[in-house]
Amino acid sequence: MAGPVVLTPRAGPSFARRNLRERPAGHARIAGASRELHADARARLRASLGAGTQLLDAEPGALVADFDGCSLDGRALTTLTELGAVIRDGRIAEVEGAFVIAWRDHAGALHLARDAIGHRTAYYAEHAGQLVFASHLCALLDAFELPRRIDLRSVAAFLSCAYIPGRGTMVQGVHELLPGEQISHHGSLSRRTWWAMPAEPANAAATPDEASKMRVSLRNALERVIGAALPDGPVCASLSGGIDSSLVVAIARRLHAPPVRTFSITFGDEYKNELAYSSVVAAHTGSEHHVVHLRADTVIAHLDDTIARMDKPNGDPLTVPNALLFQAMSEHGVVALNGEGGDPSFGGPKNLPMLLAELYGNPDGEPDAFERERNFLRAHLKCFDDLPAMLTADSYAQANTPPLEQELAPWFNDPRWPTFVGMLMAINVQFKGGHHILPKVDALAEPFGVLPRSPLFAKSIVELAFSIPSTLKLSGSTEKYLLKESVRDLLPGTIVDRAKSGMLVPVEGWFQTTLAKEARTRILDGLSGTRIFRREMLEQLLAGKQLGLRPRRGVKIWLLITLEAHLRALRLTL
């Protein structure tokens, strides 16, 4: 097999200023209002969302949808007429796939629904006596001239998690539709949940025979959803060399006759990478492998345009590299598969900090009403414990009243999930799936006309994962045990049995050298002028004077420059 193709994007003109591609027909964004749209609002929405934007008409029965890979009873749903029939029959909870749908009923009331896991999304606000919505938050602000006030609670949530859990956004009064939620407006706003995370099985363990049957069922389900995600022609796939992306590539190669083109990222030989593992999988499966080599100056050159594509800020340092990966993929195919969803759904290692905290308890031994919730926020390893010192007194009081952890309490007290692993799984699917991973990949792929598909986050896979006993997800020290066993025959043992490491962006080194000046400018000239932060705390962070065994200085700096770019892109003020 030939060696990988090495691609090196340049730090030159940003991709936002090029002629960007439209997605295939039928995948346009949507917008509308509970009353008829005025001509100027229509023009602004089309200017922001694209010429193919679907705008909801005022007539009863009108329907618009942004959807991809939808099916019901094993039959593909490819038209608005078919989706309308599903709604009239009350079967929206049974639909598999990515969608956000808006429609008017016979009385003219407006309804807006998002798919169960959150592959597509939309934003809404009550304004001037009506409900307004759009696929992108900036389009909503521009078209309806909404106030651009910073939501301080969302600032605190973002600094704690690197994303904003729940329906909050950085803009006061503007909300994100929750996964599996429908909102309706006919004079007033109402919400209902049409799909909810399933309950765990009564038994936490399984017999050998039950485990064998579950392994076969899971394998069949994986082949079904990955097969359904494949296009007629070539398909692209991200490949880190971890079990999740590797199994998606392996099954795609077995099921797909056209080329499967895989893509990995490296930041240079001087930094840790996973190319050894991704290359093993590419060679084993026979995929056409590409390696995208990124430098610090390339990443920072594309930061502002990448963040401008995000409706809610995403502080993962991989955000810009992910965008550049989609740019590379767009030259080779329209559909891009990924392995996202394996960790949240099958008991991955990102649960370990929480499991350790549960095992050893509160270090001071004192009872804590929100101990689990606080540990969940700390487990993100971002700025949760820094907030009192990082924010001004007034900002912190507004942002943390009531405490952030209080909003998590219902998730940690839900009787549907008696095991701790099941509880974490439910939270991670909802928060990290629907408010972090899935909106991110959709927003980053869109400018390049690429359709991202995450088969491990398919509704049927999530539902099946909840039916698996917790001992088959985390078996001793083996994470994602049943998932690994279901595909063991497809991949080398070095891939199936390797420990999770993850792709690390070398921001720690970059902010000590190449990007040090850039960080100071963005944070001290940008964020410190917002009156939200204590300047002395920001200066200490930039100078490397943070205390603690694992200060994670680079990750925190990246989080702050991401926030600065987002607030500036949306032109938000206090």
Image (cartoon, rainbow, N blue to C red):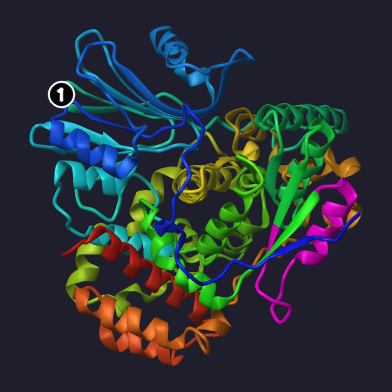
Quarter of the image for the C terminus: give it. Answer: bottom left
At x 65%, y 73%, the residue is 267
In this figure, which residue is indicated by the disc labeled 1? 36
Q: Position of residue 454 (x, y in %)?
A: 61, 40
Q: Is residue 440 left or right of residue 421?
A: left
Image quadrant assignment for residue 485: top right
Taking the magenta stretch, the answer to whether it contains residue 163 is no
Q: As rendered, which of 280 and 491 lies closer to the eye? A: 280
Q: Can residue 127 be spotted in the picture?
A: yes
Image quadrant assignment for residue 418: top right
Range covered by the magenta-colored residues: 264-287
Please, what secondary structure does the residue beneath circle 1 have?
Answer: loop
The kind of residue on which mark 1 rests is Glu
Residue 478, compared with residue 116, is above or below; it is below
Q: Position of residue 166 (x, y in %)?
A: 37, 46
Q: As rendered, which of 306 and 157 lies closer to the eye? A: 306
At x 46%, y 59%, the residue is 15
Q: Can residue 124 be spotted in the picture?
A: no
Q: Position of residue 132 (x, y in %)?
A: 21, 34
Q: Is residue 303 left or right of residue 58?
A: right
Taking the magenta stretch, the answer to whether it contains residue 281 is yes
Within-10-Å neighbours for mark 1: few <14, some 14–19, many 20+: few
Q: As rendered, which of 277 and 376 lies closer to the eye? A: 277
Quarter of the image for the N terminus: give it. Answer: bottom right
Q: Is residue 567 left or right of residue 265?
A: left
Residue 315, compared with residue 231, is above or below; it is below
At x 66%, y 48%, the residue is 347
Residue 185, compared with residue 554, is above or below; it is above
At x 49%, y 71%, the residue is 12
Q: Position of residue 452 (x, y in %)?
A: 57, 42
